[in-house]
Image (cartoon, rainbow, N blue to C red):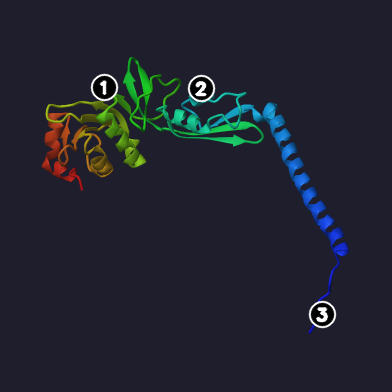
Amino acid sequence: MTKQKVISIEDRIPKLKQIRKKKANRRLLLLLSVFFSLILLVVYLQSPLSKVAEIHVQGSSLMTKQEIIEQSGLETGASIWTAGKGRAEEALLKDDRIKEASVTAGFPNDLMIAVVEQNEIAYAARKGGLYPVLQNGKILSEPVSGAPLQLPILYDFKEGEALDLFAEAAQTLPNEVFNTISEVYYDPKKNDSLHIKAFMTDGFEVSATLSTFAEKMVYYPSISTQLNPDVKGVIDIEVGSYFKAYDPAQQQETGEEALEEAEMP
């Protein structure tokens, strides 16, 4: 039978004291850390470092930097932690010109507003000016200043179904097709409230309905290249497709063969 070593109480007491002292020191360090952390937090919150120093804007062209900041509701001098970045993003998206928006905090106390704007797809002609039409079917209230882009000019269009369908066509048609559209007139008929007349850069006129415009205009290059470029007229793509020259004499010269060649693939 082995003998167990007996440790006297006198030997244990110094070790117990050391253990208790270490625990007390750890508690003290923890309390001091918390205390100084709270002091630093209070000092930080009272210092300029916790306030928004500057607001940067990225991705804007339709709107000025100041317009975007005002729309967001963000202000310099406000607490960077309670600036309301989520509310600012929601406020920005309420503007028809903005498609996407995000607000992030930067080092040490700046805010960055990044926006993706709606693309301009055309200009609405009204009141002697050209008003940008956006891809969401909205018409801006301010006319374009300076030289306009090479975009179709729309006449007699208002916000609504017809303009929405044209905007959809603008985003789905190949660029090489859409870029040949010069002017578009909203020309509703008794049996077609979505009828339009489109004038092309190659001199032809297209008669179409917006309900199938995006689908049928894809074939425009193959149709127009089969026609005599010197004989201008109307390419009707409302139902099927056929060509009618402006000059009746030229229409007779083209004959039925040209009408058949102009049919949609």
From the viewer's perspective, tell me whether residue 125 is left or right of residue 118: left
> Alpha carbon of mark 3 to alpha carbon of mark 1: how far?
110 Å
Report which residue position mark 1 lands on: 156
Element type at marker 3?
loop
Q: Is residue 53 above or below residue 102?
A: above
Report which residue position mark 2 lands on: 70
Q: Earlier in the sequence, mark 3 or mark 1?
A: 3
Q: Earlier in the sequence, mark 1 or mark 2?
A: 2
Q: Residue 58 location in percent, x, y?
A: 54, 32
Q: Nearer the viewer, residue 226 or 173?
A: 173
Q: Residue 162 location in percent, x, y?
A: 25, 30
From the viewer's perspective, tell me whether residue 7 is left or right of residue 125: right
Q: Earlier in the sequence, mark 2 or mark 3?
A: 3
Task: In the rendered structure, find residue 3 and report the number of the disc placed on it.
Answer: 3
Element type at marker 1?
loop
> Amino acid under label 3?
Lys
